[in-house]
Amino acid sequence: MSELNFPPNLFPTPSKAPDLSPEMRVGFVLSPQFSLLPVASFLDALRHAADEADFGRQIYCSWKIVGPEEGELIPSSCGLGSRVDCTFPDPSEFDYLVVAGGRLPDCLNVPEETLAYIRQARAAGVTLVGICTGSFLLAHAGVVDDTRCAVHAEHSTQMRALFPKTRPITDQLIVSDNDTFTCPGGSTALDLAFSLIRSRCGRARAVKSLTSLMVGKERAAELAPDREYAQLFSCGNSKVENAVGIMESHLSEPFSIKDLAERVNISANGLLAAFNRHAGVGPTEVWRNIRLAHSRWLLLNTSRTVTQIAFECGFADCAHFSRWFQKRYETSPTDFRKGRKSP
């Protein structure tokens, strides 16, 4: 096989990962014959939210596939399989335990220790998430009695027959009840992942997943109608639309506008003119404001230090960050956090 000679800087290497605890820790329990699409959608949403660009490091989110036996290969309904990362750990390691169902009735054929682990997670206060027919497994474990669960219309009769204490819902894509989230599968798992990432990691991280996964404009607008500079994603200028998408994928590591312009195949002056026409300001200000909006969320919702937030949002140092934050919000980051002003 011939080797490719890559031009310098064609594939940039990531900077050193910050020493931070993930804001969202997720465990996955995969059933036999699990449906691949909802699992892949959820995992890829986490992967893109967890790091800058497409590096995929588990910095802001982390995840593990857990099961009775480390290394066990679990087959999906389409034939592809996934191996268990580790034997069931203490469930308190996770903020969410995602239970992935699949083809019925095969997916219900799990060992008792799997059901016991789901019950253990419930007792530990871990939020449970059922995707596809994962709600059947939650019911099998006895943790969703008198709980509303999103179920595909094709399976509602089966749910009622097998688990009469549950309350199957067929007219909602995502249902939240009794500290449990459920969705009927397919691409709705991406919507659920977006919602949970947003609540734990902020709008900017969740939107980065939408952008990186190439979610269509119409669906993205429904999921995040209040995203920063939302109007630019349907402004009719593909250079601006693509440039803002790249900005959202580089919250911590912004680069020069010249490089940004090259990525969308336009001159730097042409990009500046396009942004001034459609946004009323230049690309530098748009990018900075996207990062400042994320910093504001972090100040309100996390215990990160101001210095950590400054670097997470792509500012050279704390003083640089504080100066721009003061200019945008007319208060210092420290005073803003003390006041806990509503967003």
Image: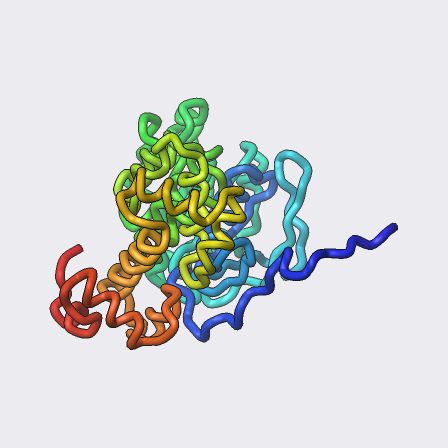
User: Residue 258, position in %: x, y?
Assistant: 48, 54
User: Residue 183, position in %: x, y?
Assistant: 39, 37
Q: Residue 225 versus residue 254: which sits nearer the camera?
A: 254
Residue farthest along the front direction in this orientation: 269
The residue located at (53%, 72%) in the rendering is 16
User: Residue 21, position in %: x, y?
Assistant: 41, 70
297 relative position to 32: left or right? left
**Residue 219 visible to an observer of this rendering:** yes
59 relative position to 31: left or right? left
Q: Residue 82 versus residue 286: which sits nearer the camera?
A: 286
Instruction: Please say which color scheme the image uses.
Output: rainbow
The residue located at (40%, 51%) in the rendering is 248
The residue located at (36%, 55%) in the rendering is 284
Q: Is residue 186 above or below residue 4?
A: above
**Looking at the figure, which quarter contains the C terminus?**
bottom left
Which quadrant holds residue 6?
bottom right
The residue located at (32%, 30%) in the rendering is 172
**Residue 184 visible to an observer of this rendering:** no
User: Residue 8, position in %: x, y?
Assistant: 67, 61
Which quadrant holds residue 294?
bottom left
Residue farthest along the right direction in this orientation: 1
Q: Number of callouts in the render? A: 0
Q: Residue 59 versus residue 284: which sits nearer the camera?
A: 284
Q: Residue 148 versus residue 230: which sits nearer the camera?
A: 230
